Amino acid sequence: MSTSNAGSNPEKLTAEGIILLIAEALDVPASKLNETSQAIDVSEWDSMGILTILTVLDREGVKCDMGNTEALQSMKGIIDVFRTAGRLE
């Protein structure tokens, strides 16, 4: 699956595609994450993990300001960020 955001119409992602992006960012197997995963349950999802997730969001053209890092504490929150940005399929 291509995650390039080249052009003016970025690719929409499924929840599963977003989970794959986050698993790659956290350097964990995708099987370790699902739509109900939370940072508290994944040791790699620490403060550095949050920064890495922010980098992935930026690369994907999805904006999330530093004051909204609470949304990055769960897969549901991250999926909602993609939804708000119009990037959820």
Image: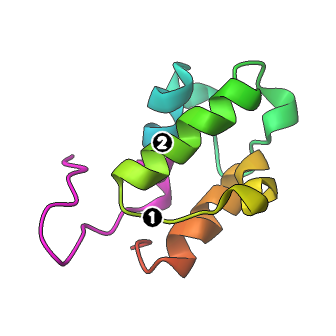
**Which residue lies at the image location 56% right of the left edge and 20% below the top edge?**
28
- Asked if 12 appears above or below 25 in the picture, the reply is below
Q: Residue at x 36, y 62 (%)?
A: 61
Q: Residue at 41% across / 62% down in the picture?
A: 14
How far, Cα to Cα, is label 2 from label 1? 10 Å
The circle on residue 55 is: 2
- Highlighted range, magenta: 1-19
Against 52, is 16 above or below? below
Quarter of the image for residue 32 reads: top right
Q: Residues within 10 Å of mark 2 (few under 14, many from 20)?
A: some
Can you name the residue that lies furthest to the right here? 40
Where does label 1 land, which residue?
A: 62
Q: Position of residue 87 (x, y in %)?
A: 40, 72
- How many callouts does the rendering have? 2
The single residue placed furthest to the front in the displayed view is: 66
Q: 14 and 43: which one is in front?
A: 43
User: Residue 24 placed where, x, y %?
Assistant: 45, 28
Residue 51: x, y in percent? 62, 36
